[in-house]
Amino acid sequence: MSNISIEDRATGAIIGAYIGDALGLGPHWYYDLEEQHQHYGEWISDYTNPQPDRYHGGMKAGQSSQSGNILSMLIDSLLTAGEYDESDFCSRLDNGLFPLLDGTPNIGPGNFTNQSIREAWALRTQQNKSWGELAGYADNTEAAERTLALAVRYATCPEKLAKAISSNTHLTQCDENVHSTTVVYGAALSLLIQGHPLDVELSDKLLNLFSNDNQPCQRRTPYETPSNIAQAARENLIQPVWKVSRVYGMSCAVNYQFPACYYLASRFSDDFESAVLHAINGGGQNMARAMLTGALVGAQVGIQGIPERFIGGLENSTELLNRAKKLAASIS
């Protein structure tokens, strides 16, 4: 692991997120695993087409969902501005995303729009609210799915990372638990990009990233979670591993998603394929689970450790890879 460069780890984190997102396109939101198995077999091992009458219907295997598209918008903003420019990113949402939505779940790029984005759209376009007045209380991981780009850009600058992720999260989500767990996820990702393992010592490193007067969240629990979960993964407490979704919860809430992602990323720290496929096969909000897990494991194995079939199977894979490499090269 120590021989992997920071740029290769950063590239792996972004491509890992794109892969996890696209893997979830077909089997997204199956809470009934018997129904999932009827449509996709006992074990999903690759990109799949969505069912025509379900979320993402009409899309094709290997395409990005709306979460992947928004991630690209934030990366493109970072590459254009050189730094996090919130007004530029908000302008991209105003002009490139919101005109394509109508406030319902199945409309928009990717044929599925998260609740937090729908609520922001309604306040912005229907009530003419300003940015800074749009955040709601949806407790999903939508912000983390885009702000992982900020964790990459500021992987070696913890104060900038915390400020940027905090501010960007508050564009769409104002719940304090969402805020704290999202910032800590980004900080954990940054340490993995630097080459630190996701182990029982990671939480102490997270606490030491920031001065006592400048902690991005004041509760200890978000910082302690990665190492507590890593200990459980080390002891192989969940068998079979795909049942991580049953143990921590199948829905979109941050309190369910982040522990599952940390478990998978620690349990399969050197096996990208196993990590993302166990995330997908657990059902429920498996797209977010695989996207966030893919970033964590991609950072640990680097771009060279991601199977080529997953990279090549992405639609516009060359464009996505170039975008990821450019962002990785911007780390200062």
Image: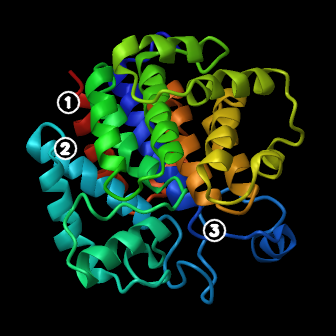
Identify the residue at the far left of this view: 81
Mark 1 Cα-neighbour bin, 10 Å: few <14, some 14–19, many ≥20? some
Q: Is residue 328 above or below residue 157?
A: below
Mark sitting earlier along the chain (2/1): 2
- The amino acid type of the residue labelled 2 equals Leu
Q: Are marks 2 and 1 in contact (CB under 8 Å)?
A: yes
Q: Is residue 161 above or below residue 244?
A: above
User: Where does label 3 land, which residue?
Assistant: 28
Identify the residue at the far bottom of this view: 53
Point out residue 244 in the picture as x, y percentages from the top left corner: 78, 45
- Residue at image point 82% right, 46% down: 247
Quadrant position of residue 236 = top right
Point out residue 317 in the picture as x, y percentages from the top left corner: 37, 54
Point out residue 268 in the picture as x, y percentages from the top left corner: 69, 31
- Is residue 108 in view? yes
Q: How far is mark 1 from mark 3, CA to CA?
A: 33 Å
Point out residue 300 in the picture as x, y percentages from the top left corner: 53, 25
Task: Assign a secondary structure to mark 2.
Answer: helix
Task: Assign a secondary structure to mark 3.
Answer: loop
Mark 2 Cα-neighbour bin, 10 Å: few <14, some 14–19, many ≥20? many
Q: How far is mark 2 from mark 1, CA to CA?
A: 9 Å
- Residue at image point 28% right, 20% down: 157
Q: How far is mark 2 from mark 3, CA to CA?
A: 29 Å
Disc number placed over residue 330 in the picture, else none: 1
Task: Assign a secondary structure to mark 1.
Answer: loop
- The amino acid type of the residue labelled 1 equals Ser
Front residue of 175 and 22: 175
- The amino acid type of the residue labelled 3 equals His
User: Where does label 2 land, which residue?
Assistant: 78
